[in-house]
Structures are given as C-alpha cells and as structure tokens.
Amino acid sequence: MYNSILIAAALFNEGATTRAAMERARKLLSPGGKITLVHVIEEVPGYVAASIPREHLTARRREVEDQLAALVEGTDDVSVIVREGQPSAGILGTAQEVGADMIMIASHKPGLSDYFIGSTAARIVRHAQVSVLVSR
C-alpha cells in the first residue's frame, strides 16, 4: 500500500483517464493516505508567447483548474496542483515536493517519434525515484 500517490492528470477524453487513475489509486492507497493530481501546462516558447495576449494564457490556466476541480468535486482525499513548464520535470518535481511514493501516468501506444525523443511517460519511468504505474 502507498501513503502518497501522485497522478499525472490528463485532461483529454473529458478526464476519463484521470478518473480511472483515481479509482485505481484509491485501491492502492493506505488508510489515511493522500492522492495528488498534477497537471503541467507546457510552456509556450517566448517567440510564440509574444504574439499571444496574456489573457489567453491566463484563461487557459483557469480552464485547466476548472476541469481539475470538476474531476475532484465531492472528494476529500484528492488535492490538485497546476504547474507550468516541461511536463516530466514538473511531474517529477511535484512528486518530490509532496513526498509521493508512487506516480501514476497514462501512456499512449508508442510511435516512431517516441523512440527518438521519448514520451513524458518514458522520461518519468527513467528518472523517477519512486514506483511508477503506467497505464494504457
């Protein structure tokens, strides 16, 4: 059993993947344990950000926060963190900050490009200091 599980929250497919991960995490959680959802908004390169009004970036963050709040509505064992930056670094950093002893992340079926640049899930598996559960 785990005391602190970090879930890398995916917001595609209306949060179904993240909901399934929360259900699975509850089965693996020790009594009194905690679940943390983290979503990392990938940073927009400076040359692109210069042409995007700041309001759009702020609105995007609010949209992500609202979607995550809807996912955890009615639960008292799940907290939410939203970060900006490189996804794998944000996930790994958050895991360390919250003292997670397991990271859960969804992965897609790898394509050719994943073998050259690596997916976020692959980076998490390679660099995590704790157990990682990858689901498809």
Image (cartoon, rainbow, N blue to C red):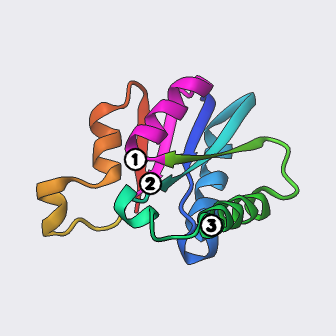
Q: Nearer the viewer, residue 54 or 21?
A: 54
Q: Nearer the viewer, residue 136 or 111?
A: 111
Q: Are the two marked residues, 2 and 1, in contact with CB atoms closer than 8 angstroms?
A: yes
**Mark in front: 2 vs 1:** 2
Looking at the image, is 123 positioned above or below residue 57? above
* Residue 51 x %, y %: 45, 70
Q: Earlier along the polypeptide chain: callout 1 or callout 3?
A: 3
In the image, farthest residue toward the bottom:
13
In the image: residue 18, left or right of residue 121: right
Looking at the image, is 8 positioned above or below residue 62? above
Instruction: Name the mark on residue 86.
Output: 1
Alpha-carbon neighbours of circle 1 within 10 Å: few (<14), some, or many (≥20)? some
Residue type (three-letter) at the residue carrying disc 3: Arg
Q: Residue at x 71, y 62 (%)?
A: 62
Instruction: Name the mark on residue 60.
Output: 3
Alpha-carbon neighbours of circle 3 within 10 Å: few (<14), some, or many (≥20)? few
What is the count of numbered marks? Answer: 3
Q: Are the two marked residues, 1 and 3, in contact with CB atoms closer than 8 angstroms?
A: no
Rounded to the nearest angstrom, the CA distance separating label 3 from label 2 is 12 Å
Rounded to the nearest angstrom, the CA distance separating label 1 from label 3 is 16 Å
Rounded to the nearest angstrom, the CA distance separating label 2 from label 1 is 7 Å
Q: Nearer the viewer, residue 67 or 25?
A: 67
Highlighted magenta segment, given as a residue range: 85-106
* Residue 86 x %, y %: 40, 47
